Image (spheres, grey):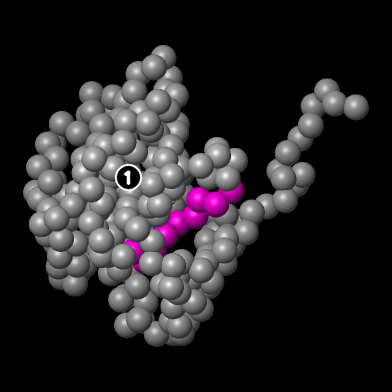
Amino acid sequence: MEVLEALATRKSVRGFEPTPVPREVLREVLQISSRAPSAVNSQPWEFFVLAGDVIENIKRGNIEKARSGTAPDPELRIGREASREGVAMGWPPDSVYRQRQVALAKQLFQLMEIPIGDNEKKMQWMERGLRFFDAPAAIVIVVDQSIVERVPLLDIGAVMQSICLAALSHGLGTCIEDQAAMYPQVMRDFAGIPESKRIVISIAIGYPDWDFPANKVDTAREAIDTITSWCGFD
Ligand SMILES: Cc1cc2nc3c(=O)[nH]c(=O)nc-3n(C[C@H](O)[C@H](O)[C@H](O)COP(=O)(O)O)c2cc1C
């Protein structure tokens, strides 16, 4: 698959076929993705690849935590979690960033036939996220705690996007998910992730079920000329 085609067609997949993804395919995805750039070639990423009983136990464990009312305790705080705590990475309530989040939620809820006030259906949708959207596999990206003071998010972002693009050439779909890592202890317990590693992000991965309504989401992008300043051009 051409790079431009991959960049243009990658989208978040939130419904998967149950077909397992062969270990060798996932290894190839990671192998090529590890060509991603990183500051001073530090390659701060490490991967835990989940499948089989391990991922199923994590799905169950996440749901149990949520249903028991346990407060999420993600090791990387972004978006809503961050803004709740006043952390710099959260987006202000009236901002365009928040508006884009709302637009995404509206589209997803419409496709999934979740009425605005239907908290039970909303909860079911949230639980799908905690279950890696029922993907048969997931890749968890961790960084060593020794570099945690400066979590190398730029490098992690580069390898994360590479994984999503490389997956496409194997017919795989992905959804980057902070949601599934909301209860990191569950992942640690079932996948054996040691305390010496910080869980940064997870990526649900599998063969897309293109009939699944949420996979029809078509997210908008800001017009490039409204976000770009051209300097030194005629
Ligand atoms: C850091 C990060 C965390 C994300 N976490 C979630 C998540 O927890 N649940 C989810 O459904 N999508 C998640 N996404 C996917 C975004 O919602 C998605 O990338 C965005 O809406 C753009 O849509 P697209 O990927 O289909 O182009 C995440 C994406 C990123 C980059």
Q: Which residue matches tag 1?
A: 201
Q: Provide residue 11's location: percent of width, then percent of height.
A: 49, 55
Residue toward you, 116 or 212: 212
**Which residue is at a point 51% across and 78% down the rendered structure image?**
110
In this picture, is 133 found above or below 77?
A: below
Find residue 70 and report its image quarter.
bottom left
**Which residue is at a point 31% across and 75% down the rendered structure image?**
123
Q: Amino acid at mark 1?
A: Ile
CB at disc 1 and ligand 1 closer than 8 Å: yes
**Which residue is at a point 38% across and 61% down the rendered structure image?**
208
Q: Provide residue 140's location: percent of width, then percent of height.
A: 26, 44
Q: Magenta includes 198?
A: no
User: Taking the image as drawn, is residue 216 in sight?
Assistant: yes
In this picture, is 39 found above or below 224?
A: above
**Which residue is at a point 76% across and 35% down the rendered structure image?**
229
Residue toward you, 29 or 176: 29
| Start-end of magenta stretch | 8-16
Q: Residues within 10 Å of mark 1 (few under 14, many from 20)?
A: many
